[in-house]
Image (cartoon, rainbow, N blue to C red):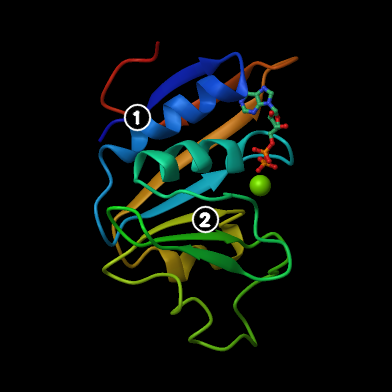
Amino acid sequence: MTASVCQTASAAETEALGAGLAEQLRPGDVVLVSGDVGAGKTTLIRGACRALGVSGPITSPTFTLGHRYAGGRVPVSHLDLYRLEGLEGEDPALLDDYVDSGSVAFVEWPAAAAPRLDVRRTVRVSISHAGGDTRTIEAPIASACK
Ligand code: ADP
Ligand code: MG
């Protein structure tokens, strides 16, 4: 997949972009979502999860490494590694509950675990603030940006 660069003007547009991305995901994929605080990582992941059939709240994991969402057309994991400084000294099985060949995993702040997350097909998304409610999003989506 080649990356497209899109601009969105609202959270709803970013959710729609996430839904477009979800169309191309398959079990085992790991989606690395980079961007500053408030850029819209969780918002994009929410749109993708909805498109995958997940209902219920989609929020950044705060007190745990991640959430597991069942009930969609594929099991989904949602990790936030903001507080993880690196994998040194961590349990080697740290991510095993979340990243497996049968699930789609979305990872906010992936840098600290990048080597461990690169074992399957990885999909890279980056989001940046572009003034006001505008965001610039680089993501491998098939359809051109709307
Ligand atoms: P992150 O997970 O990157 O910290 P969130 O998705 O939790 O960011 O929050 C993004 C915030 O910015 C939300 O309050 C959302 O409503 C707002 N927002 C405004 N414009 C946009 C946009 N174009 N895309 C995504 N979020 C936006
Ligand atoms: Mg978040």
Circle 1 residues within 10 Å: few <14, some 14–19, many ≥20: many
List the residue tagged with mark 2: 107
Whether residue 140 can be seen here: no
Residue 51 coordinates in the image, percent (x, y): 36, 38
Which numbered mark, 1 or 2, is in the foreground of this view?
1
Residue at 62%, 54% (x, y): give it. Answer: 109
Q: Up-down: is 137 above or below 89?
A: above
Residue 72 shown left or right of residue 107 in the figure: left
Secondary structure under the numbered disc 1 in the rendered image: helix
Residue 125 coordinates in the image, percent (x, y): 47, 39
Q: Up-down: is 103 above or below 36?
A: below
Residue 140 shown left or right of residue 27 in the figure: right
At label 1, which amino acid type do we have? Gly
Figure quadrant of the C terminus? top left
At label 2, which amino acid type do we have? Val
Residue 103 coordinates in the image, percent (x, y): 33, 64
Q: Is mark 1 within 8 Å of ligand 1?
A: no
Say the numbered circle drawn on residue 20.
1
The quarter of the displayed image where residue 4 is located = top left
